[in-house]
Image (cartoon, rainbow, N blue to C red):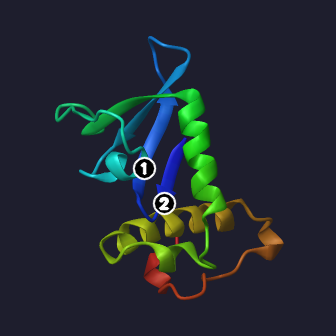
Amino acid sequence: MWLFHPLGFCSIVAHAGDPHSLLARGRISGDLERLFPGFKIQATPRRDYRYRTVVPRGAVARRVAEMVVAIDYPNFKDAAPRDRHDAYLNVWTTMYYEQVRRAPKARRRRQPLGLAPTQWR
């Protein structure tokens, strides 16, 4: 599962050696500390994700639930920190293209709103 939040981004997957834990992996320093405070972060510079931490499944569920309950913004992109806005917008754009690509042909737009024709796939 990918988790995008104003506090950061991480990938959460099953822990290969412990079925009761999950592995949270981050790309940017500080993200895991903000998303899962109190857990030891390991630097893994030669791995796909530079940072990782092991978190019990229940702790991940509680933390994600806390973040959901605390949502107070009507637009996620506007809530993202300035230094993340473009990266998060790139993900939004990619998924927008996928939405349009999968839409029934009769409902497809010739060009998505706000994007130049050269950006349209």
Residue type, mark 2 in image: His
Residue at which label 2 appears: 5
- For marks 2 and 1, give the one nearer the viewer: 1
Quadrant in which residue 6 is drawn: bottom left
For the residue pair 8 and 39, the one nearer the viewer reads as 39
Using the image, determine if residue 21 lies above or below residue 50: above
For the residue pair 26 and 87, the one nearer the viewer reads as 26
Inter-mark Cα distance, 2 to 1: 8 Å
Which image quadrant: the N terminus? top right
Residue 45 seen in the current view? yes
Residue 120 seen in the current view? no
* Secondary structure of residue under mark 1: helix
Using the image, determine if residue 107 lies above or below residue 69: below
* Secondary structure of residue under mark 2: strand
- At horizontal 58% and vertical 66% (from top left) the residue drawn is 97
Given the current orientation, which residue lies at the most extreme top position? 17
Residue at which label 1 appears: 35
- At horizontal 60% and vertical 87% (from top left) the residue drawn is 113
Within 10 angstroms of label 1, few (less than 14), some, or many (20 or more) residues? many
Q: Is residue 57 left or right of residue 25?
A: right
Q: Give whichever of discs 2 and 1 has the lower sequence position.
A: 2
Q: Do labels 2 and 1 touch, CB within 8 Å?
A: yes
